[in-house]
Image (spheres, grey):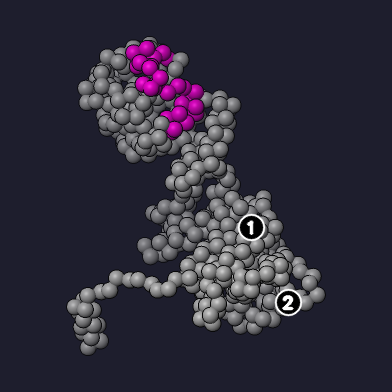
Amino acid sequence: VLTGAIFEEGCEKVAGGLNALDIWRGINKAVECCVTELKKLTREVKSNEQIKQVAKVSANGDEELGGLIASAVERVGREGTITVESGKAIHNEIEIVEGMKFDQGYLSPLFVTDKKTSVSEYKDCHILITDFKISSPRSLVPILEQTASQNKPLVIISTEGLESDVLSMLVLNKQLNGIKVTAVKAPGYGDNRTAILTDIAVLTGGQVISSELGMKLEDVTINQLGTTKVITITDQDTLIIGGGGTKEAISERCDNIREKIATAVGEYDRDRAKDRLAKLVGGVAVIKVGGSSEVEVNERKDRLTDALNATRAAIEEGIVPGGGSALLYCTPALVNLSQETENFEQRIGIQIVQKAIQAPVKIIAANAGVDGAVVISRLLPSDGVIDTSMGYNAQTGVFVDMFNDGIIDPTKVVRTALVDAASVSGMLNTTQCLITEEEPKKKIEKEKEKNKKKYL
C-alpha cells in the first residue's frame, strides 16, 4: 500500500519535469522524520495480555492462536526460543523443552539404554567436552577408569567425532564390561560449534578440553568434566537437564552472548547467538499446529508463524496504535519539516510521503464502507489537539483507544514497512528503464497453444 502510494505520486511529479533525485532526498528526509515520531509513539510491551493482543491481530483476529503464543512466551520467557511445527492431533498443543537441547544424537545405536524407545538416558552423569577428533582408544582409558571407579556414566561430546577404533572400544566396554558410556558429536559448524561447546561447558560446570590450549585427553581429570542431573540422547538430538554450572557463570555467559547479539553485523550470526541464549536461559517451546486436514494445518501454521514474527518484533521494539493511525500521527511533524525545507523539489518529496501515510487509514475505512477523509479529519482535528492513542475500529465503526482495545502494531513492522516502501519506490522513480530477460518466441507460442487447448 505504501509503496504504491509513494511510487504513483513520484511518477506523476517526475513526469511533470521535477528533479527525481531531489524528490528522493525529500522522501528520505520524510521517512527519517516519521521513524523518529514512531519512536515517540512507541510503548513497551510489558504484560502478557499485550503480547496476546499483538499475536491475535497478526493471526487475523484468531484469539486461540494469540493465546498459544502468549502462553509459550510466558513459559519460556522473552529470550526463549519458540518454534512452530505440524502436529498429529486435531487440536493445537504446546510442548516445553526445559534445559539445553541440540540437534546431534548418539554415534551408534548400540549406546541405547532403553531398546523400546531407542533412547540413551543417564542420571547423575559426567560429560567430557572436547574439540579433539579422538583417534586413539588409549587416550580415553584414564578418564573411563576414573568414572567407572565412581560408578558414574560418561557422555563424550566431541567436535570432530570419534574414529572407528575408538567407537568400537566404547561399544564393547559398554556391552561386555557394563561401563555406562555414550558418545555424541558436537552441534553446529565452524566458530558457532566452538561457541556452543563453551556454552555446554558453562551450563554443566565443566571445561572444554581444547587442543588449541595444548591440553591432552590422557591428562584429563574428573574435576574437569561437566555434570548433569539427567541427559537424554536419541538418534536425532540430545537434551541436558539440570546442568552443574553455577548461576553466576551462566549469567555472565548470557551477558556475553547478549553483547554479541547487539554488535553482530550479519543476521545469520545474530540468529545463531539468539538460539544459544535461548538454550542457556529460557528453554524451548514447540507449538504443534493441529487440524483435520493438511490444508487446514498449513494455513494455521502460516498464520501462527506470521503472528510469532510480529510478537518477536513487538517485544524487541515495542508497539504503536494499529489500523494505520500511528503513521497518520506523523503528519504534523512532516508539515513542520516541509516548512523548514528550502529546496522546492525536496518539499514535494516530503509532501508525497505525507499523502502516502494516509493511505492505510483510507483503505481500512473504505473496506468498512466509510469515507476515509472523514476518519482522518476526526483523528487529525483542525484545532491541533491530537490524541495519539485514538484510532478507528473498523469492525465496530467506533473511535476508540487503540491500546485499550488491543488494536496495536509492532513498531518494527510499521517502521520497516515505511522504510522499505520508500526505498523501493524511490529506486523505481529514479530509474530510466527496467531490464528483463526476454522469453524466446517459440516458448511464448507453445504457452499460447496450451492455453487454447485448455479452453477448447
| Quarter-of-image position of residue 78 | top right
* SS state under label 2: helix
Q: In the picture shown, does residue 174 fall above or below 408?
A: above
Tell me residue 419's x, y (percent).
55, 62
Q: Which residue corresponds to the image point at 34% horizontal and 27% vertical from the top-left?
A: 158
In terms of sequence position, does the residue under pointer 1 or pointer 2 come before the other?
Answer: 1
Q: Amino acid at mark 2?
A: Arg
The rendered magenta stretch, by its main secondary structure, is classed as: helix
What residue range appears in magenta?
Answer: 195-222
Q: Amino acid at mark 1?
A: Ile
Tell me residue 405's x, y (percent).
68, 65
User: The C terminus is located in which quarter?
Assistant: bottom left
Comparing 407 with 15, the one in front is 15
On residue 378, the disc is 2
Which residue lies under the disc numbered 1? 319
Residue 219 part of the magenta segment: yes
